[in-house]
Amino acid sequence: MSKKDATDLLNRYLAGNVTKEEKALVESWYVNYSKNAQLPDIDDQQLENSQQDNLLKLLAKIRPRAKHNYFRSLGVAAAVSGFIIVSLTLFKPFIFDKKQTATVKTIRNTPPPLPPGGNKAILILSDGSSIALNDAKKGELANDKGVKINKKANGQISYTRDGISAEQPINAFNTIITPRGGQYQLVLSDGTKVWLNSASSLKYPVTFTGNKREIELSGEAYFEVAHNQHKPFRVISNGQVVEVLGTHFNVNAYADEPAIKTTLLEGSVKVQSNGVSKTIKPNEQVQLKDGSMNIVKADVNEATAWKNGFFYFKDDDIKSVLRQLARWYNVDIKYEGEIPQREFSGEISKNIDASKLLAILSFEKITYHVENKTIIIKP
């Protein structure tokens, strides 16, 4: 959708000449960004000098000068073909559907509520017992072989030794599992911070002893590793080992994704697989696919958007987009027939009901309908 199309849609919205789907789309731009940023004051002179005069005037009419938290720093309202973004300081004409296909009739129905995910996880202790972290009250959750496990007021869990020597070996491992529709944050015994994405698991010792720190990841996690030059930190995931001393990085190792992606934000990491080793610098990414390992320039925003509460797509096909939606909304995706090749780019909050995302897909002529918790996509 072009800037002209977005402006036309907003004009028709103000005139009351929109379909139910279009009305829901425009209103969702505002409602779903209400917690993230403020709509700035805009005077007439600024509008006349702006490249986005008409668009900003329309926004000003809809939300006149009052300081509502309706926009993230990039806001919402210029189409990114399915996920619509507008910059209140610089218009960014993202193209969401880069290959315009023939108009497809959308099956119109009212999909059932599909709420977004949240902080949900299961903690499995060394004796095999489990704790539902989303239901547990703050405070001490357990004492696993002399290590206290606590839940803080913000939901984060942490590990502290309970009166035992730092060098005393403890052969105890915990596993934290996030379901589809869940995510969680924890602090390991060495101070390393971990954000665990949906449908992921992390196995780790309750305390690190010896000359290494080693954990096992399935799915996706973001790490801020506590520096210790004498104990390298290793993340083992699906045939890959990431080794660091202290750094910030993200590992995407979902089994249903075509590649394992390790993205570095700070420090330095070494990635190893099948006898091959590569070291990357900040803003670089290692991609492991079909046994080949390649270094590419990283889009850090794309790699870490999930941690910051957003979906971020960059030239992604419809199946890649829907895999992310399936994990966060705990739904199944079913394809019937041959789905046209289309590419999507853009950003939208994860804190909205899936029905609003589906309304956007509908607006972009994606044919779908919902049966229980299955989204069925048709050509």
Image (spheres, grey):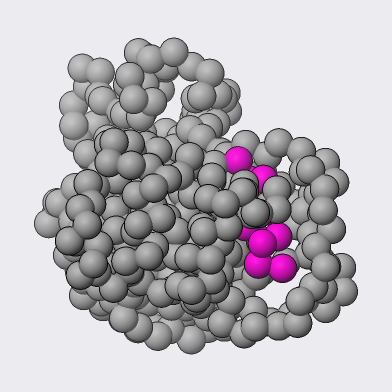
Task: Report the residue at 71% width, 36% height from top.
Answer: 113
Residue at image location 52% in from the left, 59% down from the top: 11
Vertical comparison of 229 with 38: above or below: below
- Queried whether the magenta region covers residue 355, the answer comes back as yes
Relative to 102, is 70 on the left or the right? left
Q: Position of 112 compared to 197: left or right?
A: right
| 219 left or right of 109 in image | left
Whether residue 360 is visible, yes or no, is yes
Q: Quadrant of the C terminus?
A: bottom right
Look at the image and tell me whether residue 314 can be seen.
no
Residue 365: image location, x then y, percent: 72, 68
What count of labels does the image hold?
A: 0
Q: Nearer the viewer, residue 328 or 292?
A: 328
Q: Determine whether 22 is above or below 364 in the image.
A: above
Q: Quadrant of residue 140?
A: top left
Q: Extreme left residue here?
A: 229
Closer to us: 95 or 120 = 95
Say whether residue 93 is magenta: no
Residue drawn 53% across and 18% down?
135
Q: Nearer the viewer, residue 272 or 134?
A: 134
- Residue drawn where x is 75% and y is 57% of the image: 333
Q: Is residue 37 above or below residue 299?
A: above
Taking depth in this image into account, of 177 and 315 the one nearest to the observer is 315
x, y percentage for residue 95? 49, 76
Predominant secondary structure in magenta?
helix
Residue 35 location in percent, x, y?
A: 37, 37
* In the displayed structure image, the side of residue 333 where residue 92 appears, left or right: left
- The span shown in magenta is 353-365
Choose top left, top right, bottom left or bottom right for residue 243.
Answer: bottom left
In the rendered image, residue 40, in percent from the top left (x then y), is placed at: 24, 47
207 is higher (above) or lower (below) than 44: above
Q: Which image quadrant: the N terminus?
A: bottom right
